[in-house]
Amino acid sequence: MRTQRFARRPPAPRGFTMLEALVASTIFLIVMGAVYLVYEVGAANYSRGTRKWDVQSQARVVLERLSREVRTAGYASPNKLTDPVVIATNDTLSIHADVDGTGPKYITYSRRDCSGNIGTTLYRNASTTTFCGGQPFIEDVADLSFAYYELSNVPVPYPPGSTYQLDNQGPVTGTDIPTTPIVGGSRDRIRQVKIALTVRQQVRGVTIPFTATTDIALRNLIP
């Protein structure tokens, strides 16, 4: 008589205990928290970097446009204008030139509005009659400064100061007009302008400033 043997079943797999489940959950939460922290830091750095690049790009575009127009001071084909620089202070510059081929205009750059208040907006005014305010050119301007030099790189005025108004002609308000530059006066001797522009923006409570500078030779006034 044959004896029938039955195969022995392997023991059923044992499930997780409560302690093991808690330990696994804790480790998972720690790993996920670390991943989220790395993501947050990376996103914040990317946002700051992008905004910083935007600020720098804006400043460079503004300086490029400003430089191109200031460089033409005195130009009006076929003759030179007799009043190439009409306002020259530490924070306001107004030049006279035909910058676009439509005839001579006064191009004024300043952070001052027509009431004389200094804000964070840089204004550009292109007109044949007015010398203040104008179209907003760029916002969030922390500082804008001009410095002036003669051909021999001598500062005007000499010695230079932190604030000045060449020929005692400061920024004008309303419909006022500047005095006419006289031959041999401070405004008449300007041959080079140095500009410093600082713009800033807020990113998550952090102020990001950027300063760009440029030197401009008034090529139409150089013999």
Image (cartoon, helix red, strand yellow):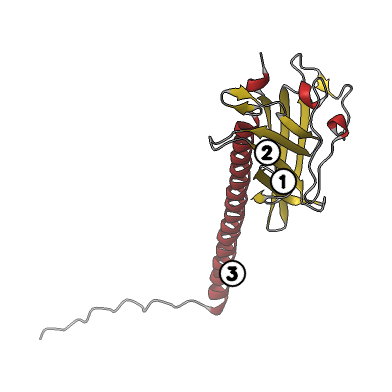
The three-letter amino acid code for the residue at tag 1 is Thr
- Residue 130 - label: 1
* Residue 21 x, y percent position in the rendering: 53, 75
**Closer to the camera in the image, 143 or 129:** 129
Residue 141 at least partly seen = yes
Task: Point out which mark residue 106 bears.
Answer: 2
Number of numbered discs = 3
User: Residue at horizontal 67%, vertical 20%?
Assistant: 221
Q: CA distance from mark 2 to mark 1?
A: 8 Å
Determine the residue positioned at 68% across, 50% down.
134
Q: Residue furthest left?
A: 1
Label 3 residue SS: helix
Task: Say which of 88 and 180 sits in front.
Answer: 180
Q: Which residue is mark 3?
A: 26
Q: Quadrant of residue 25?
A: bottom right
Instruction: Bin the neighbour count of mark 3 within 10 Å (Cα to Cα): few under 14, some 14-19, many 20 and up.
Output: few
Q: Quadrant of the C terminus?
A: top right
Q: Does label 2 or label 1 sit earlier along the sequence?
A: 2
Instruction: Classify 10 Å Cα crowding around label 2: few (below 14), some (14-19), many (20 and above).
Output: many
Amino acid type of the residue tagged 2 in the rendering: Tyr
For the N terminus, the image quarter is bottom left
Is there a contact, CB below 8 Å, between mark 1 and mark 3?
no
